[in-house]
Amino acid sequence: MTRYLLNRLGQTILIMILVSFLTFFLVSIMPRDPVYALYGSTIDQEQYEIGYKELNLDKPIIQRYFIWANKALHGDFGISYKYSTPVTKVISDKIGVTLYLSIFSMIISMPIGILLGIITAVKRGKWQDTVLTLLANITASIPSFVIAVVLMWVFVIKLKLLPTSGFTLPWVDFGKSMKQGVLPLVCLSLVGIAGTCRQTRSSMLEAIRQDYVRTARSKGLKEGFIIYKHVMRNGLVPIITLIGGSLGNLIAGSAFIENVFGIPGMGNLLVNSVNNVDIPVMQASVMLTALVVSVAYLVTDFLYVAVDPRISLR
């Protein structure tokens, strides 16, 4: 266990180093001048040269990378060009909103998606399978921002049941939070339900065709017991991988949803940082997303063993 953990931590550190270098390099070759992005386009030549040196642009890119990486390791990602505030403060104000939406949408979508996937697998070829699979395929093929626009048009513009934008945490104002959060959560959850349902159906059908299932049936065991005890335990292993990547995808992939509903989260912040060439915020946001994804996959590796004892951490 200890050896495996150290090995996975080493892989995570290597991944973070590669992501940090690629992020720094790609951001550095952006066409817009970071000096003008920070100080504005009205500065004179003398001010430009001062800003050029302050941003270490007079140094080679490798040297600039190590300077930035050293500061990042100490929690210093610089000052936001747009907000004139430390990047860590800017992100800390946004990450809570995105994590709230991401975690709650996973809590909603994963159990429902797994349940619907089990139903489609058990009822294969019947009307339940046809209807649920069709709905899952349609939902998975529609971009989340299209679903968001349609829901807003129906429930906000036409029926006037919900507010147009904004977000409030539940411990600040529970009633207002429920009204503002229902449509974003529905949009994020629908995509998760569709993907989980399709993956669960595929995994369950593969497990159902195994020899040990036929042996269990030949022994006269009840179908419900076979599905719960044998099929689900083996069929859910691929679902754990799907769950591991969902959190990171929701943190980065909620940008459209947050922009449509005017939610001040990480997705909205990342889009604004790109539009405003807010380089420190872009770099920190990408690194945070990579860290969350790496930790999520590390946790899923341990969940594999909890679900299927045949899998060894070695």
Image (spheres, rainbow, N blue to C red):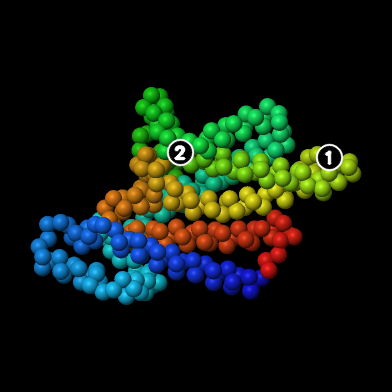
Q: State which quarter of the image contains the C terminus.
A: bottom right
Residue at the extreme right? 219
Of the residues under marks 1 and 2, which one precedes in the sequence?
Answer: 2
Viewer-closest of 152 and 283: 283
Residue 304, x across and y down, in percent? 66, 58
Under circle 2, the secondary element is: loop
Q: Is residue 155 left or right of residue 203?
A: left
* Disc 1/disc 2 C-alpha distance (Å): 41 Å
What kind of residue is marked 2? Answer: Pro
Under circle 1, the secondary element is: loop
- Dot 1, how many residues are within 10 Å of its Cα: few (below 14), some (14-19), or many (20+)? few
Q: Nearer the viewer, mark 1 or mark 2?
A: 2
Residue 146, x across and y down, in percent? 42, 35
Vertical relation: 215 (above or below) 23: above
**Image quarter of residue 2:** bottom right
Q: Which residue is mark 2?
A: 143
Whether the residues at callouts 1 and 2 have beta carbons within 8 Å, the answer is: no
Viewer-closest of 262 and 217: 217
| Res. 289 in view | yes
Residue 222, disc = 1
Q: Residue at x 53, y 50 (%)?
A: 246
What kind of residue is marked 1? Answer: Lys
Q: Residue at x 78, y 40 (%)?
A: 224
Q: State which quarter of the image contains the N terminus.
A: bottom right
Residue 54, x across and y down, in percent? 22, 70
**Image quarter of residue 17:** bottom left
| Res. 111 in view | no
- Dot 2, how many residues are within 10 Å of its Cα: few (below 14), some (14-19), or many (20+)? few
